[in-house]
Amino acid sequence: MGFADRIREIDRRIIFLVVALAIIIPLLIPIGFPIQVSPSVRDLYNALESLPPGSKILMSFDYGASTYPEIYPMSLALLRHCFRRGVKPIIMGLWPEGIPFAERALQVTVEEEGKVYGEDYANLGFKAGGIVVMQALGRSFEEAFPVDAYGTPLSDIPVMQSVRNYDNVAMVIDFSAGDPGIPAWIMIAQGRFGKPVGGGCTAVSAPQFFPYLQAGQLVGLMGGMKGAAEYETLIRTRDLGSAGMDAQSIAHAVIVLFIVIGNATFFLGRWSSRRNKGTS
Amino acid sequence: MKRQAPLIITFLAGFAMILGYFIPHEPFGSLQQILNTWYMVVAAFAMILGVGNLVKLHSAKIRRRSPGFGYSYVLLAGLAAMALFGITRGIEPGTVFYWMWWNMHVPMSSTMFSLLAFFVASASYRAFRARNVEAALLLIAGILVMIGRVPLGDMIWSRFPDVADWIMNVPNAAGQRAILIGIALGVVSTSLRLLLGIERTYLTGD
Amino acid sequence: MGQIAGAWVAALLTLFIFSFLYKDNPFYKFAEHLFVGVSAGYWFAYYYHNVVIPNLYNPLRQGHFLYIIPGVLGIMMLMRLVPKVGWISRWALAFIIGMGSGYFLITYLQTNALAQVEATMSLRLNSVNNVLLVIGVLTGLIYFFFSKEHKGVLGGAAKLGIWFLMIAFGASFGYTVMARFSLLIGRMHFLIFQWLPTIPFFRGLAR
């Protein structure tokens, strides 16, 4: 077996070990790479930053356990930004798992920023129904959510008293991992009711949302853990998103190296066999 | 009637959904809402059917003493525990259901998907070859985006992030838009075929 | 105490699943089957509390007898488990298919087809990027047109189209790698900074 063949046929468990080390070492020994902010994340930040204090935004948590490490850090960053700006988030979920994750994020950020339930934010809870719920919100929030996540009528919650429908919220933010998600919010909240829609999504689905960004249907987008890290940079807070960026950088470099080595050994092997055929 | 009735139901349900979107006023707005509530209930029963099938399958495995039947006990025990605690004691924070969800379901779900990172690495090494122009374009675009989107890219060359941004905002947006439009046309035509009863494969097999 | 026990359960199950990377083994199989069971039980309980009770049981108790219809459709769905009367489930399935088709027809037509076409047509061809965008969308769509053989001008356009599509797939590949590694980083972060510190020797790692 030639050298190129031996390199090519390496046991895949060695590849797995290299990948594991590429993640573990930067986590244990942080390098501190500076994080560049991409235009789509900056646009989302600016959209929120331009809202006057006291504005209300609708924040929908539409993701589950399998995408939690990517999207949860985004929600922390956005909630912190809202609370620091004096913007009041109205939390809801169209995925059942979204609300427990929202509550965990609220637990952390509310304590940090000293916010009070009912005055500074509200949690409407989970509602099954997808676009029908989104359409109902256009008529009346109380129609879709007669009570909040804790059984309190909306009329008894101070922050909800001036909120009748989409007309009374400044924008919609969706943390999305599938359907119902960003495309549905664009169709209803933005397309029908003219509300600016911004989002956070998994890195897997981010490329397909760039046409919406380009068309102006989305005001901004965070894609994956990198998006969360970029937003943390903008709000000057290092947390889960930023903590993983060193490991992410090294891991990507390792993948690129694997692609290069794999192709190099492939072409070397092909050249070598063509040369042998030529000389024989 | 056995075959006609489902076709009529499909047509009426779909048509009511479409009408409710374009005519939000009464009675269509309320009709859509009522039908959507019914849809959620029936979808919930579809989920119960799935669970029933799972129980049926694994009970049969245990009865037949098929290879690996011991793991079927594990599956059924997990299912029973989660379902019973959830239904009888509630699902709020502080309940056994919530504890099991946060300490079993969430970690296992994330870990299952994170395994793919290792397999992507293995595939990158063993299978991703620039055998032709198209494959080379794919790999080059992938490499530029992977490097440009992480802080390391900016350290290697300050324009790397801009290159990645350009790829995402121009050729990627163009390609994705073509795919979105193509898929949308496919979905619309399939939906119409289903609503009009031209496509009936969902009626076969009991 | 519950938190530490929970961390240990989560960590052990995580390591059991990761053990598959060495080779398939009973620990992995145990975790895999437990995952399927717990997931099914989770969805069962959630649908019970969030769909069946508020949208079927409560309305029926309050006298809204129209809700008998979805209840009956639901039971029809369950008849699929009984081979002799399984054909009845087609009625419930037809309802699901009809509603789903109606929903997707509207969503995809509105957001993905019309809005995207409008956005492309309204682009001003006053920059290289905009010109490239329009060319990319048009040639990409031409590639998907299989009713005519891809020869001549059409073939050339389709070839250009597939180049744009390959770049889009490459970008998707890059982001997919990013996504998978983000999940892996999340799990490693938990193991190193939340689980290991419960062992006295590693207490210094706690974050």
Image: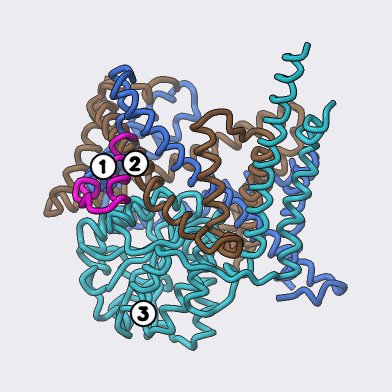
Chain colours: A cyan, B brown, C blue
Q: Which residue is mark 1?
A: C113
Q: Residue at x 70, y 76 (%)?
A: C207
Q: In the image, which is nearer the foreground, mark 3 or mark 1?
A: 1
Q: Residue at x 24, y 30 (%)?
A: B192
* Circle 1: residue type: Ala
- Badge 3 local density, few (<14 within 10 Å), some, or many (20+)? many
Residue occupying the far right of the picture: C201
Query: In the picture, residue C24 is in which quadrant?
Result: top right
Place of residue C137 in the rendered image (x, y in percent of width and height, measured from the top left)? 31, 40
Secondary-structure class at tag 2: helix
Q: Which residue is mark 2?
A: B180
Residue occupying the far front of the picture: A279
Whether discs 3 and 2 lie on one chain: the answer is: no
- The residue segment tinted magenta is C118-140
Q: Which residue is mark 3?
A: A88
Place of residue B7 in the rendered image (x, y in percent of width and height, measured from the top left)? 26, 26
